[in-house]
Amino acid sequence: MRRGLALGFMGLTCAACLHSQGPRPLRTERWSPSMTERVSDSVRAVLTRALADNAFPGAVAIVGNHAGITASFGVGQLDAADATRPTLSTIYDLASLTKIIATTSLMVQLVDQGRVALDAPVVRYLPEWRGPRASDVTIRQLLTHSSGLAAWRAFYKEATDAADARAQLMLVGPDAIPGTRYVYSDMNFMLLGMVAEKVTGMRLDSAFQALVAKPLRLLDTRFRPDSSLQPRIAPTEFDPWRQRQARGEVHDENAFRFDGVSGHAGLFSTGDDMARLARLWLNGGVLDGTRLVSARTAALFTRAQDTLVSRRALGWETPTGTNSAGHRMSSRAFGHTGFTGTSIWIDPVRDLFIVLLTNRVNPTRQNTRIGGVRVALADAVIGALGGAPARPSPPMPE
């Protein structure tokens, strides 16, 4: 275990003392003190083991229900050179959780308001997208990663600036028939971010602040955080392309080429804010009296769309038995992961959310132990709540 790494509780909140407005989930059982203690002990055990296994320099896990945070735990430190222990206010690079927290949160509103149609061609909203067969791709296919677009492209190496990167994206087209295969692609959400910009008339970061962060009171969730926040930001990797460690600037190279604002990556957030976002979905689109989206559209976005192609919902993943949901989540659960070591899972049947924020790419992205940690955390929390027995979990990858 690394020397000098501190760990400790960051607060327990009794769910029975909190209140919620809006529709109640399927299960709203009160957490007894003994249940809260079991969950806290389970979270602590998983993160302490992960720290000893060098899965990350530091992490914070947040567990709660529709009413609020019930347990949280911070372990380790921000960086080898910064012994600050992670807390609920530590700011993490969310990586691909941007797809959910920013882009999907905007798209669900635009669909709910009738401003975007799921089965409309993307070019209806983004006519400048002129890649081969681009006109065959729908909004739904972008959201479910069934557009036929390739998995990745190194725009950061090919483009000279953000305008050039956007222009090159407009020339990309699917290399498979849309709707026939699942390939997880950042380009799907780059395009969705641009759709949101066109429809709202705002740049993506401004649209997010106006339509998501402000109404939900997400105080520390933003693209391109101000330099004054740097002491609270968990550093990520030393980037050989930029020749510096990323701290307060997005880790993802393509998002950096897009000036730090893209539909696929670039958002930063805290455990406190992520818990609020999770509660919104557990409450059917309403949080503390503010309705962001109708319960019907919220349910649509969290449901698997075409199981012949994949188990993807609209933006969200759903449990497969082999992904980061682990083995005990209900079939109605939904979640997502981020490359930097972040994840969120929400189970409306159990009235439960589990958020894990880490900077596992520090010091190197070659550290892949986070996959086993995510599974272990999800299984441990649900086990502590009395969930169905899990199949034996594989050991954490070395």
Image (spheres, rainbow, N blue to C red):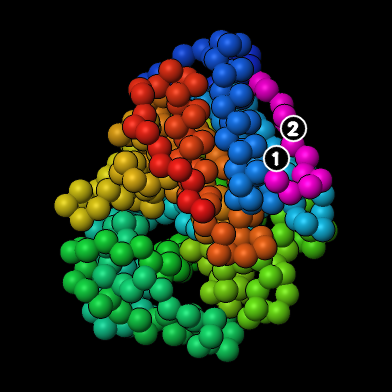
The percent coordinates of residue 120 (x first, y second) are: 26, 62
Q: Nearer the viewer, residue 170 or 125?
A: 170
Q: Earlier in the sequence, mark 2 or mark 1?
A: 2
Q: Is residue 232 left or right of residue 32?
A: right
The part of the chain drawn in magenta is 1-13
The residue that appears at 46% across and 14% down in the rendered structure is 29
Which mark identifies residue 116?
A: none
Mark 2 falls on what kind of element?
strand
- Please name the residue that numbered disc 1 is placed on: 75
The percent coordinates of residue 7 (x first, y second) are: 74, 36
Q: Residues within 10 Å of mark 1 (few under 14, many from 20)?
A: many
Up-down relation of residue 119 to residue 43 (above or below): below
Which mark identifies residue 8?
A: 2
Up-down relation of residue 210 to residue 193 (above or below): above
Up-down relation of residue 328 to residue 155 (above or below): above
> Can residue 89 be seen from the camera position used here?
no
Q: In the image, is residue 347 part of the stretch drawn in magenta?
A: no
> Can residue 362 be seen from the camera position used here?
yes
Mark 1 falls on what kind of element?
strand
Marks 2/1 in contact by CB < 8 Å: the verdict is yes
Marks 2/1: CA distance? Answer: 6 Å
Amino acid under disc 2:
Gly
Q: Nearer the viewer, residue 263 or 37?
A: 37
Amino acid under disc 1:
Val
The residue that appears at 45% across and 26% down in the rendered structure is 382
